[in-house]
Image: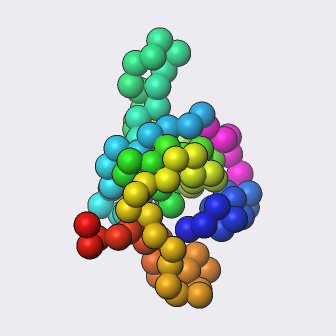
């Protein structure tokens, strides 16, 4: 997802934009997984972020708040992953078939 697509998706959703977080893993649903940092600097709540890849630092808009985790969508890729590639499909980000593009050849 290029920055314009990420921003457009994020702007359509209501919610609070969070501080930048580092994505540590992928969920089973293909979303990036991060840990929020609390005011004392300790890892806190888990956040599942659509449009984010492991190794990236992203800003996100929270779309759902639960007791044990939050969900969100990436609004800005601060530091992209080396695995992020430009999509070949002209409909990427529009049709919803593919959420992210990762270079698996490495």
Classify residue 26 as left or right of residue 37: left
Q: Identify which residue is drawn at 71% across, 51% down.
A: 14
The correct choice, above or below, for 73 with respect to 94 in the image is above
The answer to whether residue 9 is visible is no
Quadrant housing residue 20: top right
Residue at 25% in and 66% down: 106
Q: How many marks?
A: 0
Rendered image coloring scheme:
rainbow
- 91 to 1, vertically: above or below: below
Can you tell which quarter of the image residue 3 is in? bottom right
Residue under the image location 33 percent in, 55 percent down: 26
Q: Residue 102: percent from the left, percent from the top?
A: 38, 68
In this rendering, would 36 be left or right of 14? left
Is residue 14 located in the magenta-colored stretch of the structure?
yes
Span of residues in magenta = 13-18
By secondary structure, the bulk of the magenta-drawn segment is best described as: loop
Is 87 or 97 nearer to us in this picture?
Answer: 87
- Residue 52 vs 99, above or below: the answer is above
Residue 95, percent from left and from top: 57, 84
Could you tell me residue 56's position as x and y percent? 45, 48
- On the image, the x and y values in percent for residue 93 come to 58, 75
Residue 38 in magenta stretch: no
Q: Is residue 8 above or below residue 68?
A: below
Evaluate whether residue 39 shows in this view.
yes
Quarter holding the N terminus? bottom right
């Amino acid at each position: 997802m290029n920055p314009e697509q990420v921003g457009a998706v994020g702007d359509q959703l209501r919610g609070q934009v969070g501080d930048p977080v580092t994505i540590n893993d992928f969920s089973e649903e293909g979303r990036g997984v991060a840990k929020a940092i609390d005011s004392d600097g300790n890892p806190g709540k888990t956040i599942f972020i659509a449009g984010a890849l492991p190794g990236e630092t992203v800003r996100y808009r929270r779309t759902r708040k639960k007791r044990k985790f939050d969900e969100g969508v990436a609004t800005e890729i601060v530091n992209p992953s080396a695995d992020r590639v430009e999509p070949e499909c002209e409909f990427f980000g529009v049709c919803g078939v593919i959420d992210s593009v990762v270079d698996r050849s490495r």
